[in-house]
Amino acid sequence: MRSFVNVNPRDWKDAVGKLRQLNAVPAGGGSDLLGMIKEHLVEPDVLVHLKAVKGADVISWMTKPRGMFVGGLVTLEELSSFDPVRKNYTVLAEAAESVATPQIRNVGTLAGNICQRPWCWYYRNGFPCFKAGGKQCFSITGENQFHAIFGGGPSFIVHPSDTAPALLALDAQISIMGPSGTRQVPAAEFFALPSVDAARENVLAKDEVVAAVRLPDAKPNMRSTYNKVMDRETWTHAVVSAAIVLEMDQQVCKSARIVLGGVAPIPWRLPKVEALLAGQRITPELAAQAGELALEGANPLAKNRYKIPLTKAVVRRTLLGLAEKA
Amino acid sequence: MNSLKTVGHPTSRIDAQKRVTGTATYTGDLRLPGMLYARVLRSPHPHARIKRIDLSKAQALPGVKTILTHENCDVIWGSGDMRNKRYLFNNPVRFVGDAVAAVAAVDRHTAEEATGLIEVEYEKLPFVLDPEDALKTGAVEIQPGGNLSTNARGQHEPETYRRGNIETGFAAADRVFEDQYSSPHINNAQLEPRVAIAQWDGDHLTVFTPTQGISNCHTEIARDLKLAPEKVRVVCQFMGGGFGNKNQNHDFELMAAILAKNAGAPVKIEFTRKEDFLSVHGRWPTKQYYKIGVRNDGTLTAIQLRGYSGMGPYRKGTGGIAGIEIYQCPHVERMVSPVYTNKAVSANLRGPDYPQGVFGLESLMDDIAASLKMDPLEFRLKNMTRKFQDQTPYTSIGLEDCLRKGAEAFEWKQRWRAPGEKTGPVRRGVGVAMGSFGSNLGRSSAVIDVDSHGMYHVHVGVTDIGTAAKTTMALIAAEELGVGLDKIDLISGDTDRCPYSVGESGSRTTVQTGMAVVQAAKELKEQIAEKGLPPGNDVLTATVNLNPPALNGQARVSFVAHFAEVEIDIEMGHVKVTKYVAAHDSGRVVNPLTAESQVKGGATMGIGMALHEELLYDRASGLPLTAGYYGARIMTHLDTPEVDVLWIQTDDPYGPFGAKTLGEPTIIPSPAAVANAIYNAIGKRVKDLPITRDKVLGVLA
Amino acid sequence: MKISRRKFVEGTGGGLVATTVPLQAQTAAEPPKTTIKITVNGTVHRIEVEDRWTLAEVLRDHLGLTGSKIGCDRGECGACTVLLDGKNVYSCSQLAVWADGRTVQTVEGLAQNGKLDPLQEAFIEHDGPQCGFCTSGQLMSAKALLNRHPHPDRDQVRHAMTGNICRCGNYNHYVESVLAAAGTLSADARRKA
């Protein structure tokens, strides 16, 4: 590997200060970052080792406001095995658990997972595309089997994170640490479409990091799940995934949050489907309708048309399965 | 079949302890004093002429010792191409991954950095990716003379085999079926990436390298570097797999040797995983057009194959498409064109000519059975081979038992329904495919010493790529010598201490080197009977260079039938293998424990070939997109079903105790069995490997 | 984020010229180094490492522990798996400096007082390794599992070890080995040596 210096910040202020240095990048679990350095996709001079920040991996209930505080450096393994998260924010536990392998989850962090760069094979193989600061998207006329059916243009990547759709579905707040302190951004506003800035996937500035995620209070009648479709039984990014949160009142769905992964450059919320379900019993027919409605406005590319029936099925099944859970 | 004392009993590997304690030394684990590290700069273009190379910045980097390019090195790698001159550094470069320069430096980071400082000016040339495109008029000429690689007689013509008269065969048919199939370039992907260490001692060269064949590697290094054979030594004590891409010598071994000579220090050359995927070789992609004639009662009358194999730009492999031999049929015509392309080089990967050919053939045979409303098992029992190429008797043939007993173990009759009959969101289906693989006798050598303690030292030129060859040879020696395994000391993996072996490829080691071991043991026993055990530090030695007996006009072949059940979620296009039975006739099984591992491993590899693997290229740029373990979607623990193994041990009069080939037959019918199971489940066929989700959803739409 | 060092010149027709753009030479300064304290298989090491060295590199090249293998150096195969504070991780994807003050267990640390770990015995008896290159990693993932769940079932084993690729495809035997070591292999599947 190219040489760099690793610095261990004491606290968030120190971390941000170090990030402002020329050519510094944040390091969390490091799995993806080291791979990208070895592939010459990034060439930092400074790695800011965020795991050194005291308290960055705290996970605990909050009282003001009520909810759960998840430090950005909490590992995916800790997140998925923490009982209060499994019980109250199941979608997030399941999403974290679905990432890669035990070895990666043992070190990989929540912040790292939501800030992960795309796994588009053009980007990862060094093509000078939008994501690399270039002016082209090679997938449009190329191999686009795994690319976006929603929200694409000028780049057609799909967002690679599993926890991101879960956080959106939970209406989480992202705590961003920057030079002037913390700012809270709703998860829905954290991720940015390529039409906003094709080179980036989120709103973080170069000297900002995700310090924590705040989950709103878990309601007792809330149930949630994450369903991930993969090519290979494991250890792959989602072809399509669905993060669903339902607030139930007996058999009736009071409100729903449905966010898709693997279909768009950002986690893809389905507000029309959510509106369809509000106040309804989720029957097989309604779930099927939801599946159909979910694909309204889909714009497939030459090789990813199969994602349309696939996504319909994923939405329908995940919804019904969750609604029918005892 | 009679029971033996040592052979035929499940035995743990004699070197297993080393492998499980991390004390087995693989080539990459070696460090020699003063050793330099080397990395290779490779072409980022599929086809380009090198106009200019500027090494100045790289040479100025502290720690860089010496650099090779086509400008200062014109060594030809003989084994890299059996038709054309293939240099270590070629100009033009003809595939993404073709070597451009090799740098030796004090450590690997410096070597890597230096490769990044080499300035190369390329003139991009047109490129072609597919064999049929490469044969069209106007396609760029990759090798002089044209893109259809020449046959053994130097003609630009397809490799052809015929028996009977194909038109007569079609005329005799009641029905004629035609279809086409394709398979992609896939990679050996063995866990140990390529590495080699070259060390000079005066004019004597030692090369430490993970090779499947120390003997041929040794001969070829001497040849390519123009050294006397006795000045070269090849060493490999442990290696981490190869599946066919670590046989013979390799360009990077030669590069290491030349770098070491120039630098006056040992040089270790290391590959990244991507380099291993792109710059060694993989299985040739194929396009297969079959036309098959059959009578209404299901009897085959004609089989015709027109096939095209993409060889990459160098002819390192045969490009064959095999499988037809498994069927009895009076009229056969096979015309296979090995064609140059600008993709990664294609050569041997487990059963090189077979699994892709069997996929195409068995898919169509399966369709024919369905059309005739025949159980595909019955169709195969009817038409399976009885004599090799319908004329030469086999030394032993257990194919029928493989099919019948395999079917029984699999519960075929209970599980099979006509294809497409299933309904519902999740559908199960079963498929069968059969295969065969040559088990020829051949020349090999063995040396056995016995010392005064009654300890036998067996010297064989094996390296054990994971097949347990060391253990197999030890078992054979122990059996013939009539002693326990604890009396055997196996010496392998060093050309200074071991005699010729054909190399662990073509699944020949057990048979060929095994026979040499048997003969050496026999001769040693005679010596001991005559003279008794030697005194003091003396040894008695038997040296055998065996030229095997003739087969008396017979063919020696292993047979196999695999049965797969899949469960398909049709809305998701998700295929899961839920049951798998592999029935093998490999004659006598020398070590059922390790042989079972081979079968399970081959079947698993075949499932991956059926469902996942492909080296995908971007067509516009000619650049590969999926090199690496993640991109190739290599099978994991969770992808792998339980594989049940059934031995059909035919009594074969040849080979060591009647053993026949084993390692490669294990993958041969596997992709076809899975493909046929998928067809059975959904009544629709995917004809392009890999059978991925999008393709399954595509045929169901 | 810097652009890939490969630059393609846009254009049509043949004769396109492309030049690889050389990376900036880093020769000006020595690579940054840090002294770390790391406990490996019970032994404490104080060692100066370059910040860019991975844990795998330090174990293999600088501490002489070559039992952990490098199969891909990208965290895509698992051959380099070691235990870091008891958790299985890809040592190729961890910097050595990040292991400062922490505990590492490698395959060399499995046998205790010359006695093989039950997992190692089981791997031998049930033929876990074929070529053996993935074996160290498989062992360490299995060890991490049995440390937490001493009596796993087949499914738990497969899930726990799924981050370890075996291209020889010997997954069935690895799973059998782990179940045997854990005493949960059913009687009829138990192998006679």
Image (cartoon, helix red, strand yellow):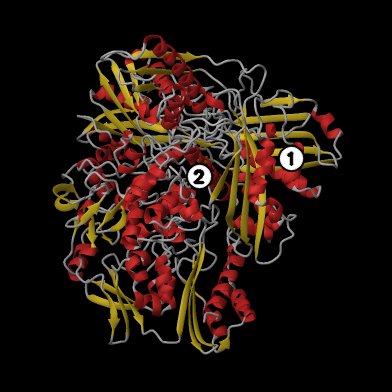
Q: Residue at x 61, y 18 (%)?
A: B154
Q: Chain letter of disc 1?
A: B
Residue type pointed to by label 1: Leu
For residue C27, side relative to residue C152 (left or right) = left
Q: Position of residue B660 (x, y in %)?
A: 56, 29
- In the picture, the quarter occupied by the N terminus of chain B is top right
Residue C73 appears in the picture as rendered: no
Return the disc, 2 or 1, that comes first in the chain's sequence: 1
Q: Residue at x 70, y 55 (%)?
A: B414
Q: Which residue is mark 2?
A: B621
| Front position in the image: B467 or B322 | B467
Q: Which mark is residue B381?
A: 1
For residue B195, side relative to residue B609 (left or right) = left
Q: Chain letter of disc 2?
A: B
Q: Position of residue B395 (x, y in %)?
A: 65, 25
Q: Which mark is residue A284?
A: none
- In the picture, the quarter occupied by the C terminus of chain B is bottom right
Residue C26 appears in the picture as rendered: yes
